[in-house]
Amino acid sequence: MEHIRTTKILHHHIASVEKLALTTSGCPLVIQCKNFRIVHFIVPRERDCHDIYNSLLQLSKQAKYEDLYAFSYNPKQNDSERLQGWQLIDLAEEYKRMGVPNSHWELSDANREYKICETYPRELYVPWTASKPIIVGSSKFRSKGRFPVLSYYHQDKKAAICRCSQPLSGFSARCMEDEHLLQAISKANPVNRYMYVVDTRPKLNAMANRAAGKGYENEDNYSSIRFQFVGIENIHVMRSSLQKLLEVNGTKGLSVSDFYSGLESSGWLRHIKAIMDAAIFLAKAIMVENASVLVHCSDGWDRTSQVCSLGSLLLDSYYRTIKGFMVLIEKDWISFGHKFSERCGHLDGDPKEVSPVFTQFLECVWHLTEQFPQAFEFNEAFLLQIHEHIHSCQFGNFLGNCQKEREELKLKEKTYSLWPFILEDQKKYLNPLYSSKSHRFIVLEPNTVSFNFKFWRNMYHQFDRTLHPRQSVFNIIMNMNEQNKQLEKDIKDLESKIKQRKNKQTDDILTKELLHSVHPESPTLKTSLCFKEQTLLPVNDSLRTIEGSSPADNRYSEYAEEFSKSEPAVVSLEYGVARMTC
Amino acid sequence: KEICLNPGALSTLDSITLMYPFFYRPMFEVIEDGWHSFLPEQEFELYSSATSEWRLSYVNKEFAVCPSYPPIVIVPKSIDDEALRKVATFRHGGRFPVLSYYHQKNGMVIMRSGQPLTGTNGRRCKEDEKLINATLRVGKRGYVIDTRSLNVAQQARAKGGGFEQEAHYPQWRRIHKSIERYHILQESLIKLVEACNDQTHNMDRWLSKLEASNWLTHIKEILTTACLAAQCIDREGASVLIHGTEGTDSTLQVTSLAQIILEPRSRTIRGFEALIEREWLQAGHPFQQRCAQSAYCNTKQKWEAPVFLLFLDCVWQILRQFPCSFEFNENFLIMLFEHAYASQFGTFLGNSESERCKLKLQQKTMSLWSWVNQPSELSKYTNPLFEANNLVIWPSVAPQSLPLWEGIFLRWNRCSKYLDEAYEEMVNIIEYNKELQAKVNILRRQLAELETEDGMQESP
């Protein structure tokens, strides 16, 4: 009996379903998933194929939030457990950790009712000199009302990373309140009076926006700012870049040249490098010049989120821990209104709003983990798991596009938070090489020379097992680390047992010596010397065994067409199509 | 003084005997003379217990039959030396088919040779046909893997070379693969090194230069061909004969890599050294010609080509995919690369055994293996994750699985501090694990002793 393989694909992960031309063996159906899994089916009857095609299309495109998996997912927890889960990440606590409020920064209640900015959170931190009229005035001069607020406060340097959207400056418009607010931000830094305004867009795009009454800050109107473009492309460029990348990598029998020319023409790594360079600019401004930075793009929820979060991660080692990274995502992405539902296409909506902005952020972090293998508490699996769940719609965290919408959806009552589930499985996500000794403000200074950027195979080919190393050093070390902890425990146990025995013996001997003065040599001593060396916990062995050395693995078919033509994995319908988990 | 004025002269010394190895005096005590570490007779003993179909032949004792072969080779038992002499006249450079590898699991073999000299009028050689067929069992088929494309192989006929006509070798099926040679490889290396050394390249330029160098394309071609050979042996149960033109370059890349894939012994340190000794040095890879100037030759050196470096890169690729299956680590490969190009040891001098004999390297210079195989040196090259496995290891040859070998090509251009520290930490964890295991074992024994003692005392 042949082993039947079942592949589970969550319906929310389906990005596209495609019916290919009929072949002799049946009708091929290709499912592309948002987690970059590609599954080929061959359905014997065309009619079945058509039916499956239609039902998959329907399943993958939900019209209402309430139909998403998170609203029916039930991990069998009671209300208080669920609420506790949601309280795991507390942003008020996080701002306290950063050191605000303080003498320069305070909590503003201007947006408490989402009256000033619908896509911002309720609680915002601003310079204490910024009065409500200034905030209101500034918000009217900023796209979508997203006025400058604090994103990260560097306690050591007393410098801040702030974020906002583009000014509605057009060719010449000014706004006194906005100018005041920027001045207030620069004055909130007692060390350095000038601050950088970083427009993350390419200069051309920003200039084009002026025609639409938007644009960028005029250095002449703002005292003490230094203006800087960093040239990250917009969501549409990023979307087609990824598409190109996936297309190239999906090619059968891909040649090395096609791979590299495809990688180049997709521009993907160029974009990743641009984001990284922008984040480094932030970190340098704060560390080297002690200057605060204000970051914006157009609406201030895509590139701005990337750059602010990555910049903070370079500056503050807390964000390189598991908990800290969750906090970072909750703060700079979720609370500040990165439109997860639109960017991930959770609902059947405008395909032009879909863009891999968050994926790029994760990739930048992965590149950092490659350059600094000991700086992160978490490992690659952690990043992949988070990526899995921004699309899975299994948990409430990434549903909706801003906090207000999430509150309206009553996510905290109706769905569960992802983070406690990840923490529960924390062992899987720990980096065994992590060196936690480092000081909180150890800055990462990545080198962004081009050759340091590599194709992230484990993300984009996560499910193509034949492409990965057959033995994972990482897993072995991870398990060994676990085993070491267990061994340390064993040693303690054994030592205390031995101590007990010895104590007991000395007592015994004392009493016995009174009775027998001579003690014959123990014959059992010999046997005890032959005590067998035990090999302990064979955890590594299974990991070291090699996948793919069995004939069942058909990796070798790629070496030569002379022997066999490689065909897509055929899963016949009778044996169960990929089971839909709902 | 002249050297100060012209350092270039130093790197292009005319006479080999003026080179460093002839003046180098070792500052260490030689425990084991590397010149005698891997004698052909010993290597053959490993096979002779498993098969009696092969024999050692001394036909090339005076290097008269084939100048690039060693004095001792392994050939089919049924073929006598007289026949070998005849076959040698039919093969390029006198390189008649010899045994390269015997697969103990199923008795299949890899043989290698130079191209047959069929020429345009389809010359035949009965002895050659007999020799090749002698290696096949009754009813079995074999594969001839020609490392040149069919086109190149056909063109070779005009120059007196050629390939095995299937009509004359009916039991054999020919497969053409195309592995590049000489200046194409050399240009590839020059381009790659140039790309790696310029840190100002933007992303597009870097990727297009990396692509244009074609280095990884060559890696993929070589690995694919080696996998194909290994597949014939292990999966198809068929013997293979491998050759290109001379049989001293791409042929050796393929035969040696196929052994890495098939043979666990070749993944140990000693086994790998034996492999290099057998499949590269003895087999007559012209190191002196190929590894003279590396990527930095100004003048076009006709024979310069990074054939051996490509081989090492391929081994590194497999090592990366099977990080626990090799007894050695990346540093071992880097060390071999360095010594192949410039060394105080005589091992890689000369182009063949006959040249090495004439130079009296064994008497006048020190063997690299004498140095490397000292325990203190070996520890640098030992892979802490190694756990012997007896399986055939099939690497992936997809471009996504074949990265640039940074340890070689970006060695001086990247900061490896954090990577080195992480490696050290990994070694620490492994060492600590061993320590703990040992300690637990001791404590368990102690406890068991105490328990039995107690038992003794309580029993009377």
Image (cartoon, grey):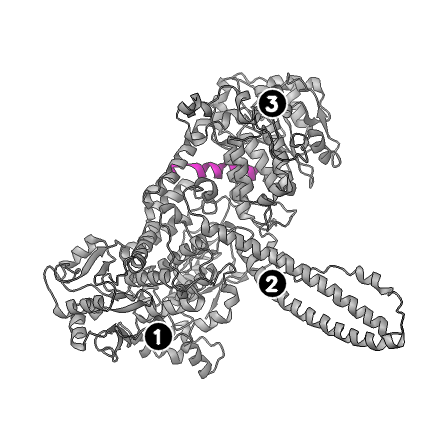
Classed neighbour count for the residue bearing mark 2: other residues with Cα under 10 Å, few (<14), some (14–19), many (≥20): many
Residue position for label 2: A484
Please state which amino acid type lies under the numbered disc 1: Lys
Image height of A381 relative to B376, above or below = below
Task: Residue A189 in the image: state x and y as whole percent.
Answer: 25, 67
Q: Provide the residue designation for mark 3.
A: B356
Residue at image coords 69%, 41%: B105
Residue drawn at 45 percent across, 83 percent down? A80
Mark 2 and mark 3: Cα distance apart in space: 52 Å
State the extent of the magenta-drawn residues as a range: B211-228
Mark-to-mark CA distance, 1 and 3 = 75 Å
The label nearer to you, 1 versus 3, is 1
Of A194 and B402, nearer the camera is A194
Q: What subunit carries mark 1?
A: A
Q: Quadrant of the N terminus of chain A?
A: bottom right
Please say if the residues under marks 1 and 3 sit with CB atoms less than 8 Å apart. Answer: no
